């Protein structure tokens, strides 16, 4: 088993993790100053969302130089220090690779748009207006409106799957491929342990740029992008060729990992596995599945049974693009969700702040930063609420910064913060640390097989087993009422409860679970 199979990944959203220089935005020295915390927490790897030079139209996902560090975050020296310090502690470091698009200020795009015969014209996707005039096809931007932007100077449209400041690269151009693969090599050579690959499903496009068909299931409360089925602009067969190239580069280095950001159905996720795929196609389905025992259990079974042989599973409960788990399911259920994430088979990814129970923060209109919210206001699509600064302590600005942060701090920061929760043996943070420690120390939980034991409307019970290393049973009550689970197995002992009590309690026969309680059991000796 490799480190990325056994390990736990922790996502750092760098703007909001720790500010060392009082400019209100997190930075690399800030992350370095918090490595002690991450080591204490017990995670194995950090994935840092983009830190490269960027005009910040999409907060780093619009890259204007792939092989440097934005001064807001620090310098390449800071990065090297971060990498060395993390490695000294046994922490791996993953970066965010953004192959689908650059910033519109990237020198490549400035050249490309400068004239039709510029050698880099074809590095991006330029099209004439459609025959009747207007946009070349009906493709939509993920952040609202058409995916095409008119460039009056030359009289052509360019494609942008995200905001117009993020023009899509043309991956059918071998020069683009060569330049972008060199980016991977640059960071691998510096010692990074892998990449999370952004917007992977959108990299390949239909060569004929056909119109996407309407989505018959779409309703106006959903994202405008979903009103069409993106069959010609996403999850294309062309993607797999590009992924293969990424993998060839990664395979030239020992022990590296590629994780694909892939919002696709389970059966489509599987296509991205394999020796020519990514190691881990991100599985976001827990984020979108209702918090109901039968639904979650069915999801796990569906996912487990779809995995090709040799494919390693993974699970994600939250990230910088979706409402926080603490707000989606509420604080009590978020504890059960944490137990689920950290006891399922497959690499867990934790989003910074979820481990202390941070909630979405409501953002007043004049504090909105996210371009998605600005493009499609007031519909609840904005991502600022889940991106607010990490709450470190009860001091000014929650210990995140000496000055006013770029996004507001949550009102609950005096009680929901790392310092307070470290000292509280029943806190969400203590629960996370205990679960992480248990997973690390228990082969059955880290790498064992998964078997569903029992599901009803409220309860989800499963077993993890690693041969001679033994088995563990996980019983989760996903409902807000007490439930009794009639165990038929041999007597067992509670290793941990979400309520952080009942340790060592012996269970024979019935297991009473309080509302929103989960337990991990070990066979009684
Ligand atoms: C997915 C990233 O997670 C998101 O934050 C970003 O806006 C888009 N890709 C575009 O890069």
Image (cartoon, rainbow, N blue to C red):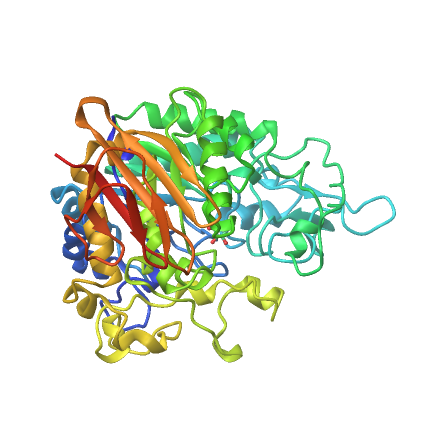
* Residue at horizontal 30 percent and vertical 72 percent from the top: 23
Relative to 488, is 270 on the left or the right? Answer: right
Does residue 19 lie above or below 164 as drawn?
below
Does residue 23 lie above or below 351 as drawn?
below
**Coordinates of residue 66 in the picture (x, y in percent):** 40, 45
* Residue at horizontal 15 percent and vertical 41 percent from the top: 90
Q: Is residue 143 visible?
A: yes
- From the image, which quarter does the N terminus lie in? top left
**Coordinates of residue 398 in the picture (x, y in percent):** 26, 74
**Coordinates of residue 259 in the picture (x, y in percent):** 39, 37
Relative to 457, is 453 on the left or the right? Answer: left
- From the image, which quarter does the C terminus lie in? top left
Residue found at the very far front of the displayed protein: 509
* Residue at horizontal 40 percent and vertical 44 percent from the top: 460
Q: Is residue 83 visible?
A: no
The total of numbered circles placed on residues is: 0
Q: Based on the displayed image, in which of its 4 quarters is residue 136 positioned?
A: top right
Q: Based on the displayed image, in which of its 4 quarters is residue 265 positioned?
A: top right
**Coordinates of residue 340 in the picture (x, y in percent):** 35, 46
Q: Nearer the viewer, residue 475 or 442?
A: 475
Does residue 67 lie above or below 19 as drawn?
above
Q: Nearer the viewer, residue 55 or 203?
A: 203
Q: Nearer the viewer, residue 401 or 131?
A: 401
């Amino acid at each position: 088993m490799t480190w990325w199979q056994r390990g736990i990944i922790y996502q750092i959203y760098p703007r909001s993790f720790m500010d060392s220089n009082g400019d209100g935005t997190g930075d690399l020295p800030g992350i370095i100053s918090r490595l002690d915390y991450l080591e204490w927490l017990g995670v194995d790897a950090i994935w840092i969302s983009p830190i490269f030079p960027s005009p910040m139209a999409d907060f780093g996902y619009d890259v204007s130089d792939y092989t440097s560090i934005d001064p807001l975050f620090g310098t390449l020296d800071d990065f090297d220090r971060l990498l060395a310090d993390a490695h000294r502690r046994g922490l791996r470091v993953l970066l965010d690779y953004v192959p689908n698009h650059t910033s519109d200020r990237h020198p490549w795009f400035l050249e490309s748009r400068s004239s039709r015969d510029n050698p880099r014209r074809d590095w991006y996707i330029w099209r004439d207006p459609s025959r009747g005039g207007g946009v070349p096809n009906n493709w939509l931007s993920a952040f609202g409106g058409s995916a095409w932007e008119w460039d009056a100077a030359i009289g052509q449209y360019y494609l942008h799957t995200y905001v117009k400041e993020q023009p899509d690269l043309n991956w059918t151009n071998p020069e683009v491929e060569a330049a972008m693969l060199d980016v991977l090599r640059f960071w691998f050579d510096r010692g990074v342990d892998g990449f999370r690959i952004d917007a992977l499903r959108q990299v390949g496009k239909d060569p004929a740029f056909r119109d996407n068909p309407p989505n018959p299931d779409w309703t106006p409360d959903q994202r405008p992008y979903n009103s069409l089925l993106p069959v010609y602009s996403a999850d294309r067969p062309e993607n797999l060729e590009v992924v293969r190239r990424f993998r060839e580069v990664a395979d030239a280095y020992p022990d590296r990992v590629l994780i694909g950001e892939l919002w696709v159905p389970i059966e489509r996720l599987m296509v991205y596995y394999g020796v020519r795929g990514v190691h881990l196609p991100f599985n976001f389905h827990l984020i979108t599945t209702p918090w109901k025992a039968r639904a979650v259990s069915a999801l796990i079974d569906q996912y487990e049974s779809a995995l090709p042989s040799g494919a390693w599973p993974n699970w994600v409960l939250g990230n910088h693009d979706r409402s926080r788990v603490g707000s989606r399911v509420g604080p009590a259920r978020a504890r059960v969700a944490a137990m689920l994430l950290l006891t399922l088979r497959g690499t867990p990814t934790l989003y910074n702040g979820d481990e202390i129970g941070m909630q979405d923060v409501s953002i007043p209109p004049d504090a909105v930063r996210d371009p998605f919210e600005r493009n499609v206001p007031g519909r609840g699509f904005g991502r600022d609420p889940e991106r607010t600064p990490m709450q470190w302590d009860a001091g000014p600005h929650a210990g995140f910064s000496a000055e006013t942060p770029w996004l507001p701090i949550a009102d609950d920061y005096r009680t929901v913060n790392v310092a307070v929760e470290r000292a509280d043996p029943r806190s969400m943070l203590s629960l996370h640390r205990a679960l992480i420690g248990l997973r690390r120390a228990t082969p059955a939980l880290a790498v064992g097989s998964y078997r569903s034991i029992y599901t009803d409307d409220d309860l989800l019970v499963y077993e993890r087993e690693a041969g001679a290393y033994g088995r563990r049973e996980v019983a989760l009550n996903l409902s807000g009422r007490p439930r009794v689970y009639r165990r038929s197995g041999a007597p067992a002992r509670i290793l941990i409860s979400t309520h952080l009590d009942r340790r060592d309690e012996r269970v024979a026969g019935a297991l009473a679970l309080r509302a929103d309680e989960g337990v991990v059991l070990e066979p009684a000796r």
